[in-house]
Image: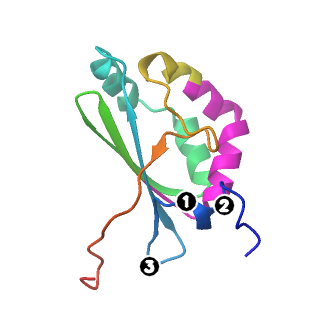
Amino acid sequence: KGCALDPKCSANLPSMTHTESTSVRLGFTWRIRQGMSEEYDRQHAVVWVALETRLREFGVESFDIFRTGETVFALVVVRDVETLFSAYAIDPIAIAWEMHMKDLLVDESDPTTGWPLMLRHVWSLGASGA
């Protein structure tokens, strides 16, 4: 309702699956520049506390990052996708983190969200076995 033509509207984002609560799971993927994987890991061993605080304030319940070689996958559970995307885009701490990390990453962000490429949800084994 009210967002049929809005590409940023959560109802139009194909990679989202709803958890049993009102939260949404998002899958993202991105690539690290060649030879920068170890530095990427080092930077994520000390993610800024201020950034973690902001992500929680923006409704992120969990944010898990996995890596193989230079390919990265993230699973994010968030209460409201639009709030996360819009707040993160203008937050000074988030912007500083993105600037801090930009030389390590291949820029393949989605121009409509500014976030890495979202993955389309294909299947889940839910708590009920479905």
- The one of 18 and 59 positioned closer to us in this rendering: 18
Provide residue 42's location: percent of width, then percent of height: 33, 23
Provide residue 88's location: percent of width, then percent of height: 65, 42
Mark 2 surroundings: few (<14), some (14-19) or many (≥20) residues within 10 A? few
Q: Nearer the viewer, mark 1 or mark 3?
A: 1
Mark 3 surroundings: few (<14), some (14-19) or many (≥20) residues within 10 A? few
Provide residue 83's location: percent of width, then percent of height: 68, 55
Q: In the rendered view, how is the structure colored?
A: rainbow
Please name the amino acid that badge 1 sits on: Leu
Q: Which residues are magenta?
A: 76-98
Residue located beneath label 2 in the image: 9
Mark 1 surroundings: few (<14), some (14-19) or many (≥20) residues within 10 A? some
Residue with the most extreme front position: 5
Residue at point 66%, 61% (across, down): 9
Q: Against 105, is 82 above or below?
A: below
Provide residue 86's location: percent of width, then percent of height: 70, 47
Residue at point 33%, 37% (across, down): 72
Please name the amino acid that badge 3 sits on: Glu
Q: Which label is found at residue 124?
A: none
Circle 1/circle 2 CB separation < 8 Å: yes
Please name the amino acid that badge 2 sits on: Cys
The residues tagged by marks 3 and 2 sit, at their Cα atoms, a distance apart of: 20 Å
The residues tagged by marks 1 and 3 sit, at their Cα atoms, a distance apart of: 18 Å
Residue located beneath label 1 in the image: 13
Name the magenta segment's main secondary structure. helix
- The one of 42 and 2 positioned closer to us in this rendering: 2
Q: Which label is found at residue 20?
A: 3
Circle 1/circle 3 CB separation < 8 Å: no
Q: Tell whether position 14 is magenta.
A: no
